[in-house]
Image (spheres, coloured by chain):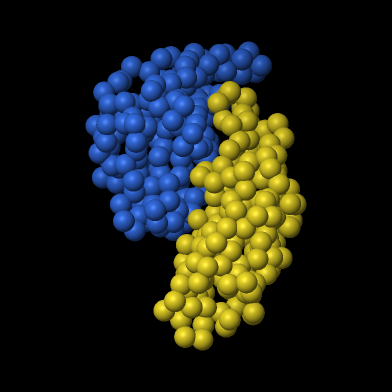
Amino acid sequence: MIRISVLSAALALIAIAAPAVAESGRPAPAELPAPPEGKGQIVFWRSGTMMGGAMGCGVNIGKERISALGAGKYFILNIEPGAHEFNAKSEAKDVLNLEVDAGERYVVKCSIRMGIMAGRPNLAPSTIEEFNAKKSDLKYVDSDDIGPRVLADPG
Amino acid sequence: MVLVASALSVPPVLGQTPSSEEQPTPVIVQGQEAIIPAGTSVTLRIKQPVSSRTAKRGDLFEIELVNNIYLGATPVILAGTKGMAQVVHASPKGFGGRAGELIVAARYLEAGGRRIVLRKTKFSSAGSDNAGAAIATTVAAPVIGLFVTGTSVDLPVGGIIVAETAEPFAIAP
C-alpha cells in the first residue's frame, strides 16, 4: 500500500514538472487597459514556474469555464460589479470569493501545488505590483482560451 | 450650492502610524444640509482581530473612523464613529504549502442613527507560501498593522484599512 502511494506521488511529481509548450499570446503591455465604465476588472495570471507546468489552471465561475492559464500566461476579465465566486479544480476544488466595485481592479494568481494524483490549482489574491514584477515573462492566454467573457489580447 | 472645505484623513503609509495631519476634502452644502460626496476617502481602524486561520466568509467585525470629517472648522462626523466590516473571503493555510488568504470589505459607518455606506476597501492578502511566490500586500492602497505570520494573514486590532463612501451622505450642519 505504501509502495503504491509512493509510486503515485512520484508519478504526480513527474506529471506536474513537465514544461509548458504553448506560447502564442503577446507579452503584457506597459499599461493594462482600464475597466470599461461601470465595470470592474480582474487580472488572472500564473507564473512560468516548472511546478505543474504541463497542467492548465482552468478558471471557472460556477460550472462556466472562463479561461485556462498555462504556465506564464495571463488574461483580463471585465465584469459586472458585485460578488463573484471563482473556482479552479482538479482532484480538489479551490474557491476564491471577490467583491468588485465599478472601476476597481483585482489581481488573482493561480499556482499549482502538489497533489496526490495530480497538481492542485490554487487561486489567491495578488497585487498589481506582483503582476508587474512578473509581467515581462507573461504572455496573454492562447486564442482558444479566450472565452466570450475574456478581453481580447490587449498587447 | 456652495463648496466648503472640510478635512479628512491622510491616507497612511505602510508601516507608519496614522498621521494626525488632515487634508481638506470637499463637503458640499445644499440649503440646510451638508453633503459628504460619494467617493470620499475614509481611513478606518480595525477594532477586532481578523485572521485567515479562523475567519469565515461573512464574519462581521467592528471598525471605527480614524479622523474627524469637518464642515468648515466644525467636525460633523467624529473620529471614533463606529461601523462594521465583513470578511469577503478567508481561507486558512492548507495542504501542499497553500498560504492563508484574507479579503475584507468595510461595509458602513453609523452616524446619527444612519449608515454611511462604504465601498472599495483596499485590503486583500495571501500569506507567503512555500511555493515561493506570494507576498503579503494590499490591492491598491496602504494598510497599517498587517502581519503575515508564516503562511497566515492576520489583521490585528489597530490595523488600518482605507475605503470610500459609496453614496452622498446628507447631514445637518
Residue at coordinates 66% horizontally, 61% vertically from top-left? B67
The spot of residue B130 in percent (x, y) is: 62, 25
B115 displayed left or right of A50: right
| Chain identifier for the blue-coloured part of the image | A
- Vertical comparison of A137 with A75: above or below: above
Q: Residue at x 34, y 46 (%)?
A: A34
Q: Quadrant of the C terminus of chain B?
A: bottom right
For residue B12, side relative to residue A34 (left or right)? right
**Quadrant of the rendered structure where residue A56 is?**
top left
| Residue plotted at (58% across, 73% down) | B71
The answer to which of A154 and B30 lies nearer the viewer is B30
Count of labels in the image: 0
- From the viewer's side, name the closer residue of B141 and B132: B141
Q: Which quadrant of the structure image shows residue A28?
A: top left
Q: Position of residue A82 (x, y in %)?
A: 44, 58
Q: Position of residue B85 (x, y in %)?
A: 62, 60
Q: Is residue B88 visible?
A: no
For the point 75% across and 52% down, which residue is it?
A: B157
Horizontal side of B13 relative to B17 (left or right) equals left
Indicate the quadrant where residue B95 lies.
top right
Left or right of B19, for residue B88 = left
Up the image or down, A121 lies above or below A83; here it is above
Nearest the viewer among A129 and A97 is A129
Residue A77 in view here: yes
Q: Quadrant of the N terminus of chain B?
A: bottom left
Image height of A23 relative to B11, above or below? above
- The image shows residue A2 at horizontal and vertical percentages of 66, 16
Chain drawn yellow in the picture: B
